Image: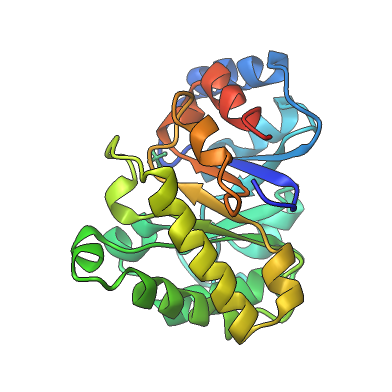
Amino acid sequence: AGSGKFFVGGNWKCNGTKDSISKLVSDLNSAKIEADVDVVVAPPFVYIDQVKNSLTDRIEISAQNSWVGKGGAFTGEISVEQLNDIGCKWVILGHSERRHVIGEDDQFIGKKAAYALSQNLKVIACIGEKLEEREAGKTFDVCFQQMKAFADNVLSWDDVVIAYEPVWAIGTGKVATPQQAQEVHVAVRDWLKKNVSEAVASKTRIIYGGSANGSNCAELAKQEDIDGFLVGGASLKGPEFATIVNSVI
Ligand code: PEP
């Protein structure tokens, strides 16, 4: 881990029921959590209010998506204003499932980031290459292009956490090695230094996501430029998520 405050987010994706979420919340409420970590969970929209009303204030709430502009006649969407209204502090944008399953492109994601930040909703900005892109030696190109789309839209980086999530590692059980992750994290930090500023490069947290779990988090967290995790599958188990949160060193 680097010098920024360790950050661990749990992305619950499209999982859970009222009952299973109530159990998860109660496990999180009783878990011991280190003081020096920012902890955030992202429930499905329909359960945000339930979670907000039952989860300890120690853990902040994130949405998994937000509409690109002010709310209105956009059937099926959830606005940034509504997220603010129910006490959501964060939104995950550019997640690989939104990019590659739903088809969101860089420009749309960049605009969403601009709008969320303009309304004081903090952003977990996800980037990451697909397997074929890695195999073709394009990992950095892909990540830098996705970074540029964010950077073109971000005026202040104070409320942004970058999540490097190689697509081949998400939900596959194939975690990046600490060296593979560190290599990209350094490159992204270097990109920020060259294209934004030295100050932003050194203070912006870059977290890793992709099959992080209670067994592999400690080795990853030792890497100099890994400032935390975005966790999918393992965030659905309270005690394991707490282990990942507490892997801060
Ligand atoms: C994610 O979707 O952000 C993620 C990291 O998922 P998983 O931990 O399940 O690979």
Look at the image and tell me whether residue 77 can be seen. no
In what quadrant does ligand 1 lie?
top left
Q: Nearer the viewer, residue 61 or 233?
A: 233
Direction from residue 168 to residue 71 in the image, left or right: right
Residue 183 drawn above or below residue 32: below
Q: Where is residue 108 in the image (x, y as percent from the top left)?
A: 46, 78
**Image-based side of 141 in relation to 41, left or right:** left
Pick the front one: 218 or 26? 218
Residue at coordinates 35% horizontally, 40% vertically from top-left? Answer: 175
234 lies above or below 169:
above
Q: Nearer the viewer, residue 112 or 4?
A: 4
Residue 6 horizontal/vertical position (percent): 69, 44
Question: Does residue 197 lie above or below 96 as drawn?
Answer: below
Q: In which quarter of the image is residue 76?
A: bottom left
Name the image quarter holding residue 61.
top right
Q: Which colour scheme is used?
A: rainbow
- The residue lying at 38 percent from left, 53 percent from top is 180
Position of residue 163 measured from the top left corner of the image (x, y, whole percent): 52, 56
Image-based side of 40 in relation to 66, left or right: right
In the picture, which quadrant includes the N terminus? top right
Name the residue rendered at 68%, 51% in the picture. 2
Viewer-proximal residue among 249 and 30: 249
